[in-house]
Image: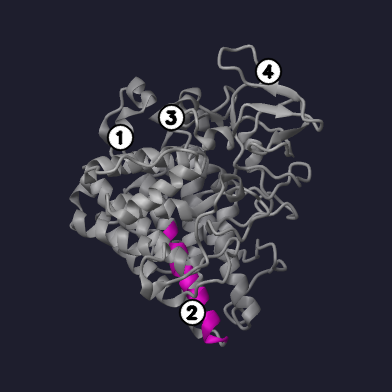
Amino acid sequence: MKTKILLLSILCGIIALHSCSLDEEPYGFYSEDNFYKTEGDAKAAINYAFATLTYIEYSRALYFMGDMPTEILTTKGDASVDNRALNLWRIDNFDTNGTLVNFFKYSYIAINRAHAVLKNMPNTDIDQRLKDQYMGEAYFLRAYNYFCLSRNFGLVPMHSDLVETLHQTGAPLAKNMDEVYNLMIEDCLKAEELLPVYNSPVMGRVDRVAAQALLAKIYLYAASAKENNVPLYRDMSKDVTEMYAEAKKYAGRVLNFDSNYAQHTYGFENDLLSIYDVENVTGRENIFLMSMHRSGESEGQYSKISKMFLPYIEGATIWLKQGETDQYIRSHDGWGEYQTEIDFYNEFEDDDLRRKHLIADKVYNANGEIVAQWNPGGGGNLEYPFSRKYIDPQFDGDKTSTRPFLLRFTDIAMVYAEAAGPVPEAYEVMNFIRNRAGLNDLTPGLSTAEFREKVYNERKFEMAFEADRMYDIRRWGKIGEIQEVIDAGLSENQYTFYPLPQEEINLNPSLR
C-alpha cells in the first residue's frame, strides 16, 4: 500500500493529471493554459475525479471499514496487522493504521479533484448541458466523500476550494457537525438541480437520482444519529423530525413517490441474482456503481474484490450453483481476506434466499459435482461459507469486473421506510424486499420505533458484504454492543469515531 505523506499526495494529485477511466486515453500534464479547452478535456477531468474511488487503497478499505469491524465479517489469521486491528478493535494503532490513513488520503484527493472541476469548468467553452452535468457530478463527489469521511472520522478538515500549494493544505477542522452537513446538503441540492436523469445507469458516474439518494442517506444518518444520542450528532442544531421528513422526501423522489420528480430509470430487480450479475451494469438497482472492468490494464481499472471474499481452494477454477436451478457459473478461488462470521450466517432465517443464493457453502466442478463444502459441525474442506455477491464468470486470471455497490435502489428504499415509519408505502417496499428474499411480510400495526428497528435489522441481511453495516451500527449508537469492543473495554469516546491520522495532525498546524 502507498504510504506517501497525505498532503504531498494531494498536491501531487493536482499535478499528475492523467485519466484512469477505461473509456478515455491517458492524459498527461495539463497546464492552466491548455486544460478544459474541449469537451474531451472536460470529460477527462470529471473521469479523473471519479477514478480516485477505484484506487486499491480506497476500494478495499470500504469493506475493511464498513463490514470488518462488525458481526458480519472477520479476516484470516495472517492478514496485515492494520486490518486485523480493525477487525478486533485494537485501537492503539488506529491513528497510524494504513487502511484508515489511505482511505482518508484518497477521500481528500477525490475532493480536490472535484474542486478542480468546480474551479475550471465554469470558464470552459463547451455545451452548457455538459457543463451542468460535470459540475453537478463534482458537487456530488465532494458531498459523497465528506459523507464518507464524517461517518468514519467525525469532524474533519474542511477544504472548500482547490488546493494548489502546500500553504493551502492547512484547512481548519469543522467547528461542528452542522458545518459538515450544511456543505453536503448544499452540494447535493446543487447536484440535483444541475444533473440530468440517465435513460439507464452509467457505470462509475452519477445523475440526479444519485444526488437525491445521497441526500436521503445524509438526512437519515443525521436524524437517526441525533435521535440515538451519538456524540457530535447529539449537538446538531437540526431538528430530528425535520431531518427524517427530508430523508423521506428525497428517498421518495428516488422511489417515484413524488410525481413532480417522476423518473423510471431505477427500481427493484425481481430476483436477487440479477442484482449481482456483473454483466448487468445497467441494472435498475445500480444508482452508483464503481467503475471497474476486467479489460483494464492495472488493478483499479479491473477488480480483485472477488478474490478478497472467496476462500483458497487449491488455486482452482470452481463452479457455483445458480439459485434453485441446475445452472452453474464458474469463478476463480480467492485469498480469504473477507470471511463470513459464522454467527452472522446462522442468524438468517432458514428460508432466507439471501443466505441460500448469495452465500455459498458448497463449490462444484464443471460436471456439477461437489468438490468442497462447509459443514456446521466441522469436517468440511471449505473454511467458511462465503459471499458470492462478487462473482465474475468471465474472469481473466485475477482480473474481474466485480464492483462495489456505492448506492443501490434497495438501500434507498429502506432509507425511505426507516425515515417514513409505518406508513403504507414503507410497508410496501419492506414487504417487497422481504418477499424477494423468500420471507413473509412484516408484522402490521407496528409503532414507529418498532418499525424502524425492523428496518434496521433487515438492512443487516440485505446490505451484508456491501460495506454498509458499520455505519448503521454507528448511527444507531450500538458500537458498544460489538463483542470485540466489549472485550477491549473501550469507552464511547474511544470507539465512536476513528482518530484523524497522526501524519495529518503533524502536517496541518490548524489541527494541533
| Amino acid type of the residue tagged 2 in the rendering | Asp
| Amino acid type of the residue tagged 3 in the rendering | Glu
Q: In the image, is 339 to the left or to the right of 463?
A: right
Main SS of residues in magenta: helix
Disc 4: CA contacts within 10 A as few (<14), some (14-19) or many (>=20): few
Q: Which residue is mark 2?
A: 132
The answer to whether residue 509 shows anywhere in this view is no
Q: In the image, is 327 to the left or to the right of 349?
A: right
Q: In the image, is 400 to the left or to the right of 337?
A: right
| Amino acid type of the residue tagged 4 in the rendering | Asn
Labels 2 and 1: the sequence-earlier one: 2
Q: Residue at x 66, y 51 (%)?
A: 278
Q: Nearer the viewer, residue 87 or 209?
A: 209
Q: Which residue is mark 1?
A: 478
The image shows residue 137 at horizontal and vertical percentages of 49, 69
Is disc 1 placed on a helix, strand or loop? loop
Q: Residue at x 41, y 27 (%)?
A: 90
Q: Which residue is mark 3?
A: 71
Find out whether the residues at labels 3 and 4 contact each other: C-beta distance under 8 Å: no
| Amino acid type of the residue tagged 1 in the rendering | Lys
Disc 3: CA contacts within 10 A as few (<14), some (14-19) or many (>=20): many
Q: Nearer the viewer, residue 171 or 363?
A: 363
> Disc 4 vs disc 1: which is toward the camera?
4
Is disc 4 placed on a helix, strand or loop? loop
The image shows residue 149 at horizontal and vertical percentages of 40, 51
The image shows residue 338 at horizontal and vertical percentages of 57, 33
Labels 4 and 1: the sequence-earlier one: 4
Q: Magenta part of the protein: which range?
A: 126-144
